[in-house]
Amino acid sequence: MNNRLCELLGIEYPVIQGGMAWVATAELAAAVSNGGGLGLIAAGGAPADVVRSQIKKCRELTDKPFGVNVMLMSPFADDVMKVVIEEKPAVVATGAGNPGKYMEELKAAGIKVLPVIASVAMAQRMEKMGADAIIAEGTEAGGHIGEITTMCLIPQIADAVSVPVVAAGGIADARGAVAAFALGADGIQVGTRFICSDECIAHENYKNAVLKAKDRDAVVTGRSTGAPVRALKNKLTKEYQRLEKENAPFEEIEKLGVGGLRRAFEEGDVQMGSLMAGQSAAMVHKIEPCADIIRSYFKEIDKMLETIKTKMDV
Ligand code: TUI
């Protein structure tokens, strides 16, 4: 494929792997980049030295472009950005905040900046500040989320900015990809489905929980504390929701989630671990290589377009 996102990033397929904290390691990022997409190492809440060694490891595993997703709510965000500017991965994606104060230095280092945003106003602000593309994430996504659905967000962002738009949230197969392009996107970001890849080193219990998930299993906690997070329903999310309902003190609610991602990813604790995943979990049915996942989004497009023509009677 040779659309403008592929051209911008020097990749073969317009697929960016979501920056999932803990899950998106150098191994996963390299596998996605080797498969023709853009892999991202998720800095999450990791200290800067860990991020540096992940970048070095990724360089050993691939000679294709890859990026780092910097989670701006991390207490280490400033230090992580310093490391990233030194190490110069091809791309920096940001999440959970406004990357404005880092933009000039990132661009001066020749790094492409792709902020993940969840509103039209933020997309416009990011374009003005020099973002190379916008990743627009709908509320179907996993992890920290905004309010607007992918279906409503993408066309509005596509109308509001001129840079390439990457659609994120709920895109689990070729139907979702066709829909995203129809809505005006130039590419897609895929998160949840990559959890269920051979190369993802998450605990097998986490992967199996995604495979088992049904339509209403990816629930939201933290609306009351102002940081809504989507994860698979378990003892942790039920406890969280109970405390929220009782208007428990903020600190008590937040304490529950501490270490939750590590418990899920490393220990495979499917009860008290934070199994962050999007609504598309219900559409993930097998564990397969990243390269196959990427290619699956572009299979049988002609047949699908024919079906659409028939259904729309044109
Ligand atoms: O960032 C994400 N998803 C994440 S971050 C994360 S780590 C975490 N762990 C525990 C609790 C909370 C987070 C897990 N998942 N997605 C990208 C995203 N960014 N979605 C929404 C936003 C966003 C929100 C506000 C982007 C910009 C923004 O701007 C606020 C402002 O400054 O105006």
Image: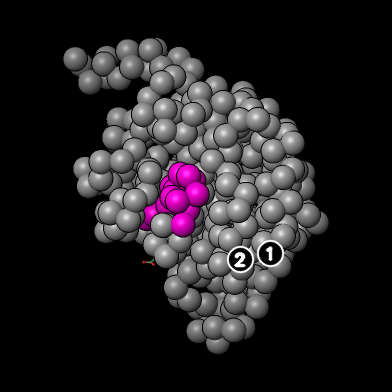
Residue placed most toward the observer, 129 or 159: 129
**Does the image show residue 188?**
yes
In the image, taking residue 36 as reference, residue 188 lies left or right, namely left
In the image, taking residue 23 as reference, residue 77 lies left or right, namely left
Contact, CB < 8 Å: mark 1 with mark 2? yes
Q: Residue at horizontal 54%, vertical 83%?
A: 250
Residue topped by disc 1 = 47
Residue 24: mark: none
Residue topped by disc 2 = 79
Q: Which residues are magenta?
A: 105-119
Looking at the rendered structure, the kind of residue marked 1 is: Pro
User: How far across and down, in percent of the image, does residue 60 sit?
Assistant: 74, 36
**Does the image show residue 293?**
no
Quarter of the image containing the C terminus? top left
- Is 184 situated above or below 275? above
Quarter of the image containing the N terminus? top left
- Is 75 situated above or below 265? below
How packed is label 2: few (under 14 Cα within 10 Å), some, or many (20 or more)?
some
Looking at the rendered structure, the kind of residue marked 2 is: Asp
Q: Secondary structure at mark 1?
A: loop
Q: Residue at horizontal 39%, vertical 62%?
A: 100
Residue placed most toward the observer, 209 or 4: 4
In the image, taking residue 215 as reference, residue 159 lies left or right, namely left
Q: Earlier in the sequence, mark 1 or mark 2?
A: 1
User: How far across and down, in percent of the image, does residue 142 sit?
Assistant: 53, 52
- Is 189 situated above or below 102? above
User: How far across and down, in percent of the image, does residue 302 sit?
Assistant: 38, 12
